[in-house]
Image (cartoon, helix red, strand yellow):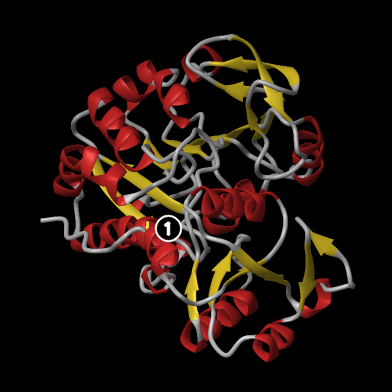
Amino acid sequence: MLEINERDVWQVLAESDRPTVIYGMGNGAQMIISALEQRGVKTSDIFASDGFVRGHSFMGHKVLTYSQICEKYDDFNIVLAFAVRQPEMLYRIRELSRERNLFAPDVPIAGGGLFTREFFEENREKFELVYERLTDEESKRVYGNIINFKISGKVEYLYSSTEYSKANIFKDILNLNKDDIIVDIGAYDGDTVREFTEFTGGCKKIYALEPDGKNYRRLVKNTADMPNVTTYNLGAWSCKGNLIFSETAGRNSHIGSIGKPVEVTDIDSLINEPVTVIKMDIEGAELKALEGCERTIRRYAPKLYICAYHRNDDLFALPLKILQLNGDYKLHFRHSPYIPAWESNFYCTV
């Protein structure tokens, strides 16, 4: 049974008598500070890594160094407000979490609301259904860890969920090989294309889709010398058409209400051959893109690599949709090193 025992990070912080200090600046910090204010939690100070402190202010607070925070307060709560994936920073955050009460609240990249204990309880039946369909015990362990993290903001759940490397996933779960025909949806600058080709030594074909104009130009440049790679300046959706796209020239470009019109397509219309792998990392549009892969998934049962961290309901909506399209899929779940719970993905095979 899925064991979820944590309390909401927002409630814990609201009940704490320690000062709350924010570590980091940017959009993530703004969202977290706003969510805290709505729950009556005052931001006492903001600090940044030493290289980012230049005597400036952020949201009305002078940005301090960690040592200045330690001089100012005997004890305090640290709220991490930026994403971390570099090994040295992951080590730094782990050390900080051992020194202080450190939390990394989860705020969705797409959609609204927060991943709270109430949200989990409202959807417990769906979470339990997915948990029971997970193929292996490691998937179940990591799935439970990620849910507990999203509720509590406790980073130790993430550190204990990264024991299975991406190379192991490619080898032991997806069994990537030179005969694969891969569709990389949300190809960014070609980073996963490189991962695929380096692991396999070169795939039979790779179709790479990227709607962001600047990212697409990088994708074309970075894959120019790779054989059998076809690129498309397209977004993936449930059907052909045009949508508004918020271009950030980064990983977080996404379908939205403000931005530029971009062309989108369903994969079923774009590619008419026996696809063996589909990867999706498209900032919350995964469910719509899966709808656009219905014929391909039903007919060819390709291996699936689906990111499940953009929307609050991704952890149950995406796997349930996959099983609806093909009930023979075996569901695996893994988390690669990242704070918050980004790079928490479903890997599906038949």
Secondary structure state at the residue bearing disc 1: helix
What residue is drawn where x is 28% and y is 45%? 118
Q: Is residue 62 above or below residue 125?
A: below
Residue 68, horizontal then vertical, whole percent: 74, 85
Residue occupying the far top of the picture: 241
User: Which quarter shows the N terminus?
Assistant: bottom left
Nearer to us in this view, 3 or 337: 3
Image quadrant in which you'd find residue 89: bottom right
Residue 240 position (above or below residue 161): above
- Label count reads 1
In the figure, is residue 193 to the left or right of 323?
Answer: right
Residue 37, x across and y down, in percent: 56, 52
Q: In the rendered view, would you say 215 is above or below 87?
A: above
Image quadrant where residue 312 sits: top left
* Amino acid carrying mark 1 in the image: Trp
The residue positioned farthest toward the right in the image shown: 55
Q: x, y percentage for residue 247?
A: 75, 32
Identify which residue is drawn at 52% across, 63% down.
338
Give the residue drawn at x 53%, y 40%. Answer: 281
Residue under label 1, please give it: 10
Quadrant the C terminus occupies: top left
Q: Is residue 57 visible?
A: yes
x and y, in percent, of residue 7 in the image: 30, 61
Camera-side residue of 177 and 271? 271
**Mark 1: few/some/many CA within 10 Å (<14, 14-19, 20+):** many
Res 255 → quadrant:
top right
